[in-house]
Image (cartoon, grey):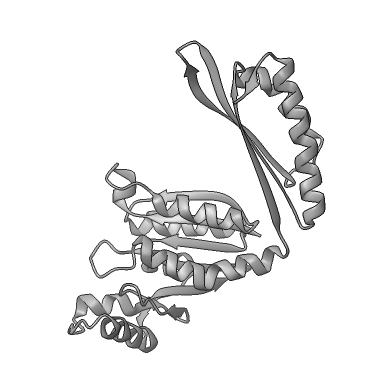
Amino acid sequence: MIIEILCVGNELLSGITLNSNAHWLTGQIAGMGGIVKRVTVVRDDLGEISAAVQDTLARKPDILVTTGGLGATYDDLTLEGMAAAIGKQVVLDNRAVEMLKKSYAVRKLNYDLTEARLKMAKIPEGSTPIQNLVGSAPAIMEQAGRTKIFCLPGVPSEMQAIFEKLVLPLVKEGVGRFVAKEINYSVRGVTEAMMAPALVNIVESHPRDAIYLKTHPRGYYRKKTPQIRVQLISRGSDEKDVKKRLGAIAKIIEKEVARLGGRIC
């Protein structure tokens, strides 16, 4: 199950806003066993958005998730960019208008449907609007070739609610049965470079998607003793096999740390 993420917003590229949406999405997808192949971030620019969508569709992922750019302001251009990329026009959609009204009603907001607010109901022709009960702007679902596209709001609470309800079940269904088990070691007295040869041997002796093995530097203990974290994840469809693999690799790591003169804290 291959997923790509496209985040839209000037604020993400100017240091104003941390891209927490990408961090959250990748964690949710990986936790279900999906594979995020790429995260792309572009400005609020029609050409940039359209080009990014076209590039992504050329790689034919199963799902493309976009975040941001669905609002009422002049620089909310995600749907126009997506429409241009797939050769469509944006049109005022009656279903999206009703969803907008419902969003306001749920939150007891007595807003007039001004031209600016109706902009949020203009979607690529033939796309499916998705109700947003946390915020205002409807999300959008579109099919382009083999890729299912979900355009989600940029506000994290809105994005997360829609993703959990509609997109995550599709990821789970596409992946099938999935089990993941994890061990983390806090190691002193050993550097990443010292552990590297053993880790290469471990990774090369297992199927690519069966394990994730990574060292993370953690500075120095009392300014002189190197510290690292060793992260090991075993994954697959059979829980017994996953646990067995995890245990076998864990023993190799523990022996290697001891051989190198380090210790697990």
Q: In this view, does 153 lie to the left or right of 205?
A: left
- Residue 55: tell me if it is visible: no
Q: Which residue is drawn at 31% across and 72% down?
A: 135
When the figure is inspected, residue 229 is found, relative to residue 241, above or below; the finding is: above
Instruction: Give residue 98's position: percent from left, percent from top.
Output: 34, 88
Which quarter of the rendering shows the N terminus? bottom right
When the figure is inspected, residue 255 is found, relative to residue 145, above or below; the finding is: above
Q: Is residue 212 left or right of residue 25?
A: right
Q: Which of 253 and 123 is in front in this view?
A: 253
Instruction: Give residue 199's position: percent from left, percent from top.
Output: 71, 28
Q: Residue at x 29, y 68 (%)?
A: 71
Q: Which residue is drawn at 62% across and 63% down?
A: 62
Total numbered circles: 0
Q: Quadrant of residue 143?
A: bottom right
**Residue found at the very far front of the displayed protein:** 265
Q: Nearer the viewer, residue 203 or 127?
A: 203
When the figure is inspected, residue 13 is found, relative to residue 177, above or below; the finding is: above
Q: Is residue 140 left or right of residue 209?
A: left
- Residue 112: tell me if it is visible: yes
Which quarter of the rendering shows the C terminus? top right
Q: Residue at x 49, y 62 (%)?
A: 65
When the figure is inspected, residue 145 is found, relative to residue 254, above or below; the finding is: below
**Residue found at the very far top of the displayed protein:** 224
Q: In this view, does 197 lie to the left or right of 60?
A: right
Instruction: Give residue 129's position: percent from left, percent from top.
Output: 43, 79
